[in-house]
Image: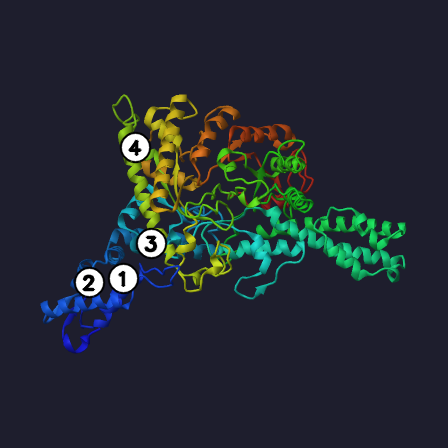
Amino acid sequence: MIDTEEKLQLVVIKRNGKKVDFDGTKIALAIKKGFDSVNEQDEETGKYKYTAADITKVYNDVIKTIEKNYTEKIKIEEIQDLIEESLNKKGYEEVHDSFSQYRERRAQSREMFVDDKRMHKFLKTIEGLGLKTANEDDAKRENANIDGNTAMGTMLQYGSTISKEFAKSYLMKKRFADAHDNGEIHIHDMDFLAMGTTTCMQIELDRLFKKGFSTGHGHLRPPKDISSFGALAAIAIQANQNDQHGGQSIPAFDYYMAPGVLMTFKKEFKQQVNDFLDLEGLLSHISMDRIAREIDKLESINFSIEIFEPIYKDSDEIKRLFEKAYDKALARTNRKTYQTMEAFVHNLNTMHSRAGAQVPFSSINFGTDISPEGRMVSMNFLRATDEGLGHGETPIFPVSIFKVKEGVNYNPEDPNYDIFKEACKVSAKRLFPNFSFLDAPFNLEYYRPGDYRTEVGYMGCRTRVMADVTDLNNQTTGGRGNLSFTSINLPRIGIKYGICLHERDKADMKGFYKELGELMELVRDQLLERFEIQCNKRSYNFPFLIGEGVWTDGEKLKPTDRMRKILKHGTLTIGFIGLAETLKALIGEHHGESDKAQKLGLEIIKFMREKANEFAKEYNLNFTLIATPAEGLSGRFVNIDRAIYGKIKGVTDREYYTNSFHVPVYYNTTIKHKLEIEAPYHALTNGGHISYIEFDGNTAANIDAFMGVIRMMKELGIGYGAINHPVDRDPVCGYVGVIGDVCPGCGRKEFEAIPLEEVKNLNCGC
């Protein structure tokens, strides 16, 4: 580069009017940042697309232009204009676009601090966080998994509020921020945009267990028994929560934990054989080293004692001792497995992440491992869930998901049918597990018998990650997750083009689809913008998620590598909410009320899915469509729309928009009809879905009816479903669960008076 210090004696006028001496190195750095923002390393050659020579070429061109046209002073904006002109002239179009967008975002961020109205609103939000309770301030309740009244919870909300304003003012295009603020779309987890975090993860525990892992404060060795398997599983969920803004799920919990059962059994069996032989004075007649070697060869806890015949030979007494040792070892292993599952459940409801303010949002998928070890894990996890927490409370985490599969657990002759029945019994009492259906056509197409990695796993919230357009050989759930998602306010478009507010005989569907398509394209561009922020982060920014190889191929990156080559396997997801209200606005009835409305509803969601497919093909990224899981969002949208359009019967006259494609909860219909209406939407929403059935009574008293609904879901092609029912809380002991005439926690009878001292301690909100 030329020496600018001697050749150019200029004064640079900054935006605030301050004058400083010309410094060419600052121009060089600005140009370098523009190139760095888009520079990529070739995976095969290791060479970068742009080099120092490209930066020098633009720099020299800018300096020559300044020398020729400016003699005394130059404005900072003029220098930036010259950089843009040179980038265009030299053919660096993508660098030009990046540099130009950066300038635009900086202008937006400066605008925030001179706009009195925006600043006042921002400061009022901060004031509310500091001085109001979660009952008084919506911002403190935005994340139901954070206690907004605690010190750390409030601190996180401060950070979240400031981070959102920073993202809107500095990191995203104004049209995206405006669309979010006016309620056309909702950009989920906007407060994490600057951090470049991804949303959620399906953690393959077996990869972590194989080599052990580090959480940043020392390396944890590979687990050697079921208790350490359970402890490390909880730690992995907690550690990964700190690298993402969403939840953590385990796609095949029973398969991952089963080896721990076998390891524990081998230890127990060796010990019991030794103890029984020693007790009978037979240790001197037999080699324990040989026995231990034979036990180490075992591949299952289910085997015939006859395999040890060469050791005990013709001694019936020693054979009998082996049998006793086996029975006791099996019983002790089963007990330790239960204790591990109990500890796992307790840990996930008490351990905290994110500065100690949040219990990790955790989920597990299980139920298809038919090995004796996997069955022991599944059955004992259900027992631990059924038992509840310390005072009998219903555990909220992990959100457990039982995978239903014909030939595995669905029919009475299936090997895991007993576990399916137990899952229904426990869910009828504790709300969980939910149920996923591997035979649904859109899940079954990926399933390969004998390969559990091809079984679809869900997040508890409903998110689904499976197909991968970037790698057709990796159509699996594990090691991947959602990158980010943004939801569209469908009812708003329905109001604009429907019959609810206008003197028209029928809806303007041409206008509806035109605006919906435009909004989807806007969301696509917004997701791509966020994807670029994520890809430009370094591996070292996510020491567990990437550094420990939780995300597929993360361990192959060097600490300073950018992450595009691995993040491309995640999903970019477009969501929607309020299909029922959209249909009411368009034609006056929702899909539960008429075949006409159902047909139109399916057409709308099919339109959205096809658009997402087009985006996936065009950009070779996993664009998907999700039935949005944000109940809080449904209130935000309707509040904005009511302020604009007033109360519209069946549309804006409630405090919420109906969840995704669901038939409204207030609509009186049958279970079968509700499921028949919702089932086809599962096939269209490849990014995630769920159907709920609400029961009023004590479902634990009628397990057959409960199981009948689960079977109905399966037969109708539902992908993921759940049955909700009342869960009681005893005012004396705090027991949470189904309470009949007598509280299981304290034995208090239903009509028994509450002791006066307990009344004084009740927090009733009065």
Of label 4 and label 3, which has the lower sequence position? Answer: 3
Q: Are marks 2 and 1 in contact (CB under 8 Å)?
A: yes
Disc 2 target residue? 83
Q: Distance of mark 2 from mark 3, alpha carbons?
A: 25 Å
Q: Distance of mark 4 from mark 3, alpha carbons?
A: 30 Å
Q: Would you place residue 346 above or below residue 679 in this image?
A: below
Q: Distance of mark 4 from mark 1, alpha carbons?
A: 38 Å
Q: Residues within 10 Å of mark 1 (few under 14, many from 20)?
A: many
| Circle 3: residue type | Ala
Instruction: State the mark number for residue 167.
Output: 3
Of label 2 and label 3, which has the lower sequence position? Answer: 2
- Residue 423 in the figure: left or right of residue 280: left
For mark 1, give the secondary structure. helix
- Residue 390 in the figure: left or right of residue 67: right
Disc 4 target residue? 513
Q: Distance of mark 4 from mark 2, alpha carbons?
A: 41 Å
Of label 3 and label 1, which has the lower sequence position? Answer: 1
